[in-house]
Amino acid sequence: MKRILETEEAGLTRAWVIHPDIKDVKARRLSSMALAEAVSLADALPGLEVAGSEIVPLPKVKAGTLFGTGKIVELKNRLKEAEVELVLIDGPVSPVQQRNLEKEWGVKILDRTGLILEIFSDRAATREGVLQVELAALSYQRTRLVRAWTHLERQRGGLGFVGGPGETQIEADRRAIDDAIVRIRRQLEKTVKTRELHRAARAKVPYPVVALVGYTNAGKSTLFNRLTGAEVLVKDMLFATLDPTMRSVELPDGLEIIMSDTVGFISDLPTQLVAAFRATLEEVLSADLILHVRDISHPESEGQARDVRAIMTDLGVDKDVPVLEVWNKSDKLAADTLESATNKADRDEHIFLTSSITGAGVDGLLDAVSTLLRAGSTTEVIELGFADGKARAWLFGQEVVDNEEQTETGFNLTVTWNAAQKGQFEKL
């Protein structure tokens, strides 16, 4: 995939991060926190050196240049002094604004969506992940063709020596992108079918699915590694892991589950990425239980939680699916803050204060997971004949048999199972 940002091979690209502070828009986060997150996003992209960052007050958005004339001149001088090659604007920038700012400042411009796409492009490891990012990037680039084609001359077309006006270059480019989007979607459809086959295979051995969701860098992968013994990449950076990982886990009471670690969410997640990664996030939609992992040590933890809930709603997560909040990174809390968080968690049966690093609170979380997943279980006695060997073997394979007694005609089995297992048994 061709990257939107082409960094220099020799050395780092010097970048400057700008967070436009739009006063007339109700902010979900403090500007300083927003700028810090934008800098973290920039740090997460290899090849960049953040030379500086700032909050730029924006009383009114200029349609053609985003910033006012005076501010553009002021920023131009500052960028020139710092020898900046790339400016990252933490917010939406229209194609016209991007083109005009690049012309005025003599640097490359990336908005928030473009930067996140760059990070995803760098991190995608699996074939599906690469395709999803490429699809999102093409959808993004399709709306910004004005940046690449400023002349808009027409290609020759028609018959004869001169020919008609034909199509504009921008139309040809858009058509090429549309063709590429169709091709990638077809490839993704094949991947989705493969995953559906895997999901169907798991349904034959219907272990409950527990999905980890949360804001990026909340510690999901660290918690996943502690619970499953897996070796998912863990780094203190945004979007350290992209591709979903699933592992089988046996809980302390013997219940076997499948745990899924998903891509981290972020505020103002590009709509192109939400659409492209919808197939990957289907594991969340089919989960029996969701663990919402929060970085409780982050100053804007509540705001991040609202963003995660909003994205889950957009994805269409069933409201009936139980959700437990995992207040992670308790080891980073000061003593008084830790005491307050502990009291809140103790008063709410759906909140668990944990530390993926030290393991504090993890045992209580696992007990709650077992209790919730077993809540729908029932105990019954089943009569099987000697000829029902396949059904009897299936029950033992599911580890749902509590007791078995042989009779003159067959076996009486006492089983404890959930609705999914009972449904599978009735189809045998």
Image (cartoon, rainbow, N blue to C red):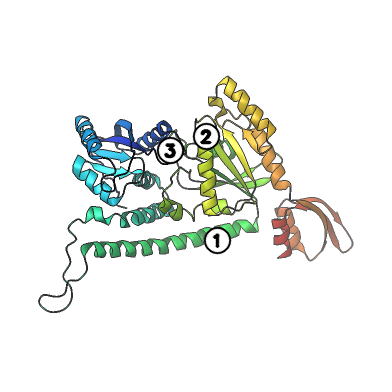
Per the image, label 3 sits on a secondary structure element best described as loop
Q: Report the front residue among 171 and 203.
A: 171
Q: Which quarter of the figure has residue 140?
A: bottom left
Per the rendering, the mark at residue 197 is 1
Cα separation, mark 1 vs mark 3, equals: 32 Å
Q: Is residue 360 above or below residue 419?
A: above
Per the image, label 2 sits on a secondary structure element best described as helix
x and y percentages locating residue 207 in the rendered image: 65, 51
For marks 2 and 3, the one nearer the N-term is 3
Q: Which residue is mark 2?
A: 301
Identify the amino acid type marked 3.
Answer: Leu
Q: Which quarter of the figure has residue 187?
A: bottom left
Name the residue rendered at 46%, 63% in the picture.
190
Disc tally is: 3
Identify the amino acid type marked 2.
Answer: Ser
Q: Report the front residue among 80 and 390.
A: 80
Identify the amino acid type marked 1.
Answer: Leu
Q: Which residue is mark 3?
A: 238
For marks 2 and 1, the one nearer the N-term is 1
For marks 1 and 3, the one nearer the N-term is 1
Q: Nearer the viewer, mark 2 or mark 3?
A: 2
Cα separation, mark 2 vs mark 3, equals: 15 Å
Cα separation, mark 2 vs mark 1, equals: 37 Å
- Taking the image as shown, residue 7 lies to the left or right of residue 284, namely left
Q: Is residue 69 above or below residue 423?
A: above
Q: Is residue 414 visible?
A: no
Of all residues, the one furthest to the top in this rendering is 335
Q: Which quarter of the figure has residue 32?
A: top left
Name the residue rendered at 57%, 35% in the picture.
226
Q: Callout 1: few (<14), some (14-19), or many (20+) C-alpha neighbours within 10 Å?
A: few
Q: Report the front residue among 200 and 74.
A: 74
Q: Callout 2: few (<14), some (14-19), or many (20+) C-alpha neighbours within 10 Å?
A: some
